Image (cartoon, rainbow, N blue to C red):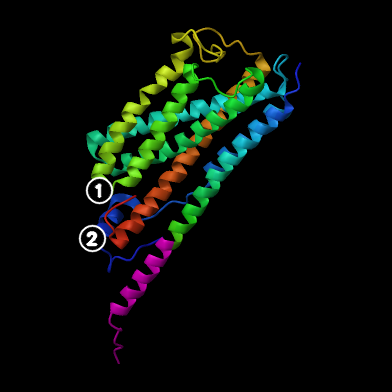
Amino acid sequence: MINTTAELIAGYTVAAILYGGYGLLLWIRARRVRRRLDAILTAASSRRSATVPPVRRSR
Amino acid sequence: MTFPSTSTPASARSVLSSGLATPKPVFDWFFAFAALSVLAVGVRAIYFTPVEALQGAAQKIYYIHVPAALGAYIGVSITAVMSIVYLWLHDDRADRAAEASAEVALLFLTVVLTTGPIWAHRIWGAWWVWWDMRLTFTLFLWFIVAAYLVLRDGIEDAAMRGRYGAVLAVLGALLIPFIHLSVYLFSARLHPMPVVLKPDKPSLPPEMLTTFLLSFVAFTLFCFALIRARYRIAVQRELVAAFEGDGGPR
């Protein structure tokens, strides 16, 4: 039997880097888009509360 | 999450009314389960599966190389089917699913095209041979999927982007049967005949076959988990684009 342990390690390392790298990329994208979405919603919510007239209290 | 009903552009309101009002988390229990399954299968392949007598430890690349190839077939097939659905029904969800699947398929194809040569270098004595049609057709499929994503990125108009991309995706998927059958169709080849996906009984020893089947299940789950996560990012991007009114989803 030939010793091919180095190839085994190289193959699994390359696969781990590719899958892990893509997972990291997805995580960064998800975080970025979520932040933008939250910022938009917060701004829209602020605009909404600013346009609603204050409630007049009845005596 | 609740969205404000006032001060939203018409495009955003249409997105909200189409059922996207509550974006689902990108990473959830299914993603974690799929990722852990892949890790567990890797540990089983390396530590608890017998070493092949002639090739030594490098043969264990088989347990990530072949499932990655099958995952790529699944990804490209989903892209093609969703593209047909898009061309037929003009449903944006199908276009989004097609794009998500294509991106994941490109990842799996990249894994196939990098792990294969590492294995082949010692066993075949060459990193790459152009006359092995399974290698060459797989590289062609990689180019087509990459071209699909680049094409989509370069077209501003959403309808045109979906239509052109769909046509390319359907044509590209036609390579899959040729890749799988290339070992039967071409006599000059280095790839061996199939040992599992063939009409007869699988010719792998039982322990290796079990590891391979577990690996196939784990990588298929991981493929679907990645596609789902990528799809959900696309949904949130579409929502952001609709609120900002910048002309449609990307």
Which quadrant is home to the C terminus of chain A?
A: bottom left
Q: Nearer the viewer, residue A51 or B68?
A: B68
Q: Where is residue B232 in the image (x, y as percent from the top left)?
A: 42, 48
Query: Where does label 1 land, which residue?
Result: B157
- Picture quadrant where residue B75 is located: top left
Circle number at residue B10: 2
Q: Does the magenta stretch include residue B219?
A: no
Residue at the farthest bottom position: A59
Q: Which residue is drawn at 44% across and 45% down?
A: B230
> Can residue B33 be seen in this snapshot?
no
Return the disc, 1 or 2, that comes first in the chain's sequence.
2
User: Horizontal placement of B146 versus A21: left or right?
Assistant: left
CA gap between label 1 and label 2 equals 18 Å
Identity of the residue drawn at 61% across and 36% down: A14
Tell me, yes or no, whether dots 1 and 2 are on the same chain: yes
Residue sitting at x 39%, y 28%: B77
Question: Residue drawn at (57%, 11%), measured in percent from left and top?
Answer: B202
Question: What is the three-letter code of the residue carrying label 2?
Answer: Ala
The stretch drawn in magenta includes residue A52: yes
In the rendered structure, which amino acid carries the disc numbered 1? Answer: Asp
| In the image, residue A13 above or below residue B116 | below
Q: Position of residue B96 (x, y in %)?
A: 35, 43
The quadrant of the image that shows the N terminus of chain A is top right
Chain where mark 2 sits: B
* For residue B40, above or below residue A23: above
The answer to whether one can see residue B168 in this image is yes
Residue count near mark 2 (Cα–Cα under 10 Å), binned few <14, some 14–19, many ≥20: few
Residue A58 percent coordinates (x, y): 29, 89
Magenta residues, as a range? Answer: A36-59
| Nearer the observer, B74 or B154 | B154
For this rendering, which residue is in front, B68 or B196? B68
